[in-house]
Amino acid sequence: MQIQELHNLVEKKIIRYIAEQGYEFVNYKNSSGINGIYRIFLPHSEIVLTLTATGTKDFIATVSINEETPEEYKSLFIKEIYRQKKYRYITAKDCGKLQGFPSWFRAHSRENQENYLHFLKNHLRQNL
């Protein structure tokens, strides 16, 4: 990494410099994300990492992309999905589907949606 890249990350408040110690992430917890975004999954992903109910901001892209190299893929992802804001928050319905709940499964009408989402993100899928 070049020194200018470090300065750019400091300006964006992603990292900070600590005298005589070096650089550290401003949001030292992974789930804090950058600019309120923890992860963006692609709609064609075959694997989705564990969804947790600790307030992480997981999103799903509304478009798919494909490239040959990791560098090209990263560049296209930033240009076409991140900067164009072509992603949406993962809903309770999305979580239920990812966790294996049937499509007809719904929270009780009096259930707080935040509690419902918390339940779904903490659910461990069981194969029967």
Image: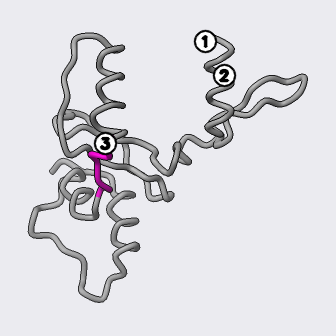
The nearer-to-camera label among 3 and 1 is 3
Q: Is residue 99 above or below residue 104?
A: above
Tell me if mark 2 has few (under 14), some (14-19) or many (20+) residues whose alpha carbon lies within 10 angstroms of its own: some
45 within the magenta span: no
Which is nearer the eye, 85 or 69?
85
Which is nearer the eye, 26 or 54?
26
**Marks 3 and 2, Cα distance to the nearest angstrom?**
25 Å
> 73 left or right of 30?
left
Residue at image position (29%, 38%) is 81
Residue at image position (52%, 47%) is 35
Which is nearer the eye, 31 or 102?
31
Tag 3 residue: 84
In the image, what residue type sits under mark 3?
Answer: Gln
Q: Which residues are magenta?
A: 84-90
Residue at image position (43%, 53%) is 57
**Marks 2 and 1, Cα distance to the nearest angstrom?**
7 Å
Residue at image position (40%, 42%) is 39
Quadrant assignment for the N terminus: top right
Residue 40 place in picture, x, y as percent: 34, 41
